Image (tube, helix red, strand yellow):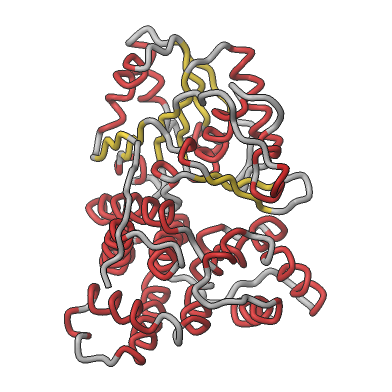
Amino acid sequence: MFMPFTYKHDVQIEFGPGKTKDIAESVKAENAGKAMLVIDKDLRKLHIADEICAALTENNIAYCIFDDFTPNPSVLSVDSCAKQIRAEHCEIIIAIGGGSSMDVGKGAAVIATNEGGIMDYMYLRKDNAKVPEHPLLPVIAVPTTSGTGSEVSECIVLIDTDNIKDVMYSSILLPKYAYVDPELTYKMPASICANTGLDVLGHALEAYIATLENIMADLFAKEAIKLTFQYLPKAVSGDKEARIYMALASMYAGIAQSKNGCVLPHAVSCPLSASYGVPHGLGVGVAQIPNIEYTRDVCAEQYKQILDYIDPLAHEVPADEAADGLIEKIKTLFTAVGVDMKLDIGAVDKAVITKMSREALLEIDIEGSPRQPVTQEDVEAFYYKMLKL
């Protein structure tokens, strides 16, 4: 049965090598007199933003920089950024980097024009969550990794004051512009390329089986999966053409997960990132096979559709065996990019597993799982499969 759908995605995408040279034109189009650049300290040391800063200066556009945040940024960093935006009278935000930079920039766009702190607007506030009353500052998102797809997504992910990862979902969080310039990923280390590439795979696989369903998003998800299997190993080895295609895959997957949502792998990865510093994409990637095993009986047809799309030789595989074929491809991918399929976070006992499982069950991604209800025992089983014990 054909499912009706509505599709709207209000972000102007500028994709291609060298595209960042044109950012000043978008700033001028917004009549912004001063820009806030959000970029982490490590990227500043690599001079990633130098060309953007030079373009702003050449066009007589003033700017200041906020870099006081870490990977897996906190709500406090967002509030601090918004405070500086107001003090400096900035009228546009340029978020440069991976998901952390873009989450800080997008979150600050909310608080710069609205009351309270960003935590007041997040998912775990439940019925007490505030809704922004005033328009947000425009955001220009400039990814330097191919992973989160935050430049085209309607969400932010932050660690709250209880050290729990929380999210805010709203179409108003979409950046006004996304400048996806693959040249900015050329200096990305192989390990980061691998981890963020696994995040792309996770976004796409999870969006395709999530209970929210949009046929346009499904198409983006399948293409992102295909591109990731085809190009991630070459991208990790430094091939520039492959990194261009991974930037495209990341954007596609970002759109897919923004519309359809994610499921259990994202939920179980959040406590690992918040408490143990596990890179988000790595945690998500390692959780993919346990999730396919967990959902194979309720998602057999979806896994068959994915396998057929990415492998023309798989058309003879029965639907009930497609999950096995997909699992084998993921195992091969992990080997090709040099990533261990188990996470080492040190000594782990039953109490740690229980604590992480309870935190994971708070995440919104649990709601999108096609297999319900999701129990604490189910989530604990994920950790036992994912961790070196």
Nearer-the-camera pick, 324 or 8? 8
Q: Residue furthest top?
A: 60
Q: Residue furthest left?
A: 312
Taking the spot 45% from the left edge, 57% from the top edge, the residue there is 196
Taking the spot 64% from the left edge, 13% from the top edge, the residue there is 87
Nearer-the-camera pick, 170 or 378? 170
Q: Quadrant of the C terminus?
A: bottom right
Task: Place residue 121 in its image quadrant.
Answer: top right
Where is residue 185? Give x, y as percent: 36, 45
Taking the spot 50% from the left edge, 23% from the top edge, the residue there is 137
- Specify whether 371 is left or right of 336: right
Where is residue 169? Give x, y as percent: 54, 46
Taking the spot 41% from the left edge, 76% from the top edge, the residue there is 335
Where is residue 278? Give x, y as percent: 62, 60
Is 383 located above or below residue 130 in the figure? Answer: below
Is 205 located above or below residue 36 in the figure? Answer: below
Nearer-the-camera pick, 1 or 81? 1
Q: Quadrant of the N terminus?
A: bottom left
Q: How many marks?
A: 0
Is 158 located above or below residue 342 in the figure? Answer: above
- Specify whether 152 is left or right of 349: left
- Specify whether 301 is left or right of 369: left
Where is residue 334? Give x, y as percent: 42, 74
